[in-house]
Image (cartoon, helix red, strand yellow):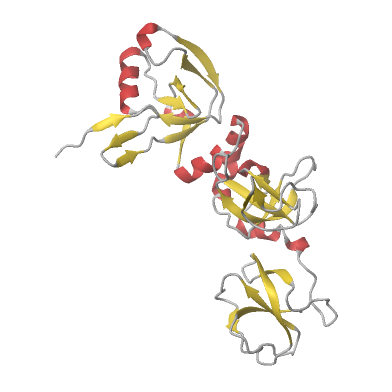
Amino acid sequence: MSESADVEDNGFLVVGEVVAMPEKYILLEDTVARRHVKGWNPISKTFADDHILKGSLLLALNDGEARDSHQYFSPPLNYKKYSDDSVKLYCKPEHVHQLSEKHFQLLLAVKLPFDRYKALNILNLVEKLVVGHGVNVVVPPIPHPVKGILRYIGPLPGEEGTQFGVELMERRGEGASDGTFKHMDFFKCDRDCAMFVAMDKLSDLVDSKANNTAIDSQRHPPLTQDTPLKRGDGVTFWDEKDKASSGVVRWIGANKKVSQNNSLLVGIETEHRTHSAAVPDSLSGMNHYFDLRNSN
């Protein structure tokens, strides 16, 4: 049994219930495209040249558009501009780079083509970032990147592509958010201590280990018997993988069952149960699971 196919104006090919998404690319060289002023009609000659910058996002032409291009243009046009499908162009294979959907969403959030082109250099590093990683983020008008911790990765209302929510670990109070964006809560932090940015505003990315060490200087000093810490305090701590986590202090003390040298320990109730360090809280007689952090 054959299935009928319709080509919609947005370039998606609909076959029954299956939608074939067009292949996505980024332009690697400046080029000249054809902008059609009165719609797509090659015979009418209603088109003008349009300069397209490297870093522009492109879609492969659908089958119907490709057939028209082969009939009327030489060489045939094979791509169209993502942000304006009235702009169609011919590109050699070496002048474009095909993008996965994840990479496309990361680059889509970057506003300017040249910044998008430069961001290709860190694309593979950025896609490995997860919430809790340490990063350096550009915070205008501060002249140098600021150290922070990733608190959110994903879409934002009214914005295109994948965005990053960063809590500032230095220059606190000079951000633009408390983890809220357009009246929606994505994470919680102090007022003006967070930024929402695209990937091009993250800098000095080397690898995941280097990302995490970016927050080393922001760690709390080691706890001592004189540390003003009490039950119910909110804290941030770093686990064995050097990932930042948050929790609430539920127990403070020393216990030889856990620490051989009887040093001060802190029991922290975390949002998610951890596997490498969590133990049942038999020390305090409660049923919570804690991360027990040695203070020394």
Relative to 182, say whether 209 is above or below. Answer: below
Relative to 54, say whether 202 is above or below. Answer: below
Relative to 294, say whether 164 is above or below. Answer: above
Q: Is residue 205 visible?
A: no
Q: Residue most toward the top? A: 44
Q: Residue at x 34, y 38 (%)?
A: 20
Q: Position of residue 140 (x, y in %)?
A: 76, 40
Left or right: 20, with 271 as reference point: left
Q: Residue at x 41, y 7 (%)?
A: 45
Q: Residue 152 is drawn in which quadrant?
A: bottom right
Left or right: 159, with 233 as reference point: left
As rendered, which of 115 and 250 lies closer to the eye? 250
Left or right: 126, with 34 as reference point: right
How many numbered dots are placed on residues in this image? Answer: 0
Q: Quadrant of the N terminus?
A: top left
Q: Residue 190 is drawn in which quadrant?
A: bottom right
Q: Quadrant of the C terminus?
A: bottom right
Left or right: 194, with 63 as reference point: right
Q: Is residue 121 visible?
A: yes
Q: Residue most toward the right? A: 226
Q: Residue most toward the left? A: 1
Q: Position of residue 169 (x, y in %)?
A: 75, 57
As rendered, which of 114 and 68 lies closer to the eye? 68
Q: Residue at x 36, y 33 (%)?
A: 12
Q: Residue most toward the front? A: 183
Q: Residue at x 37, y 38 (%)?
A: 21
Relative to 283, say whether 173 is above or below. Answer: above
Q: Position of residue 225 (x, y in %)?
A: 83, 83
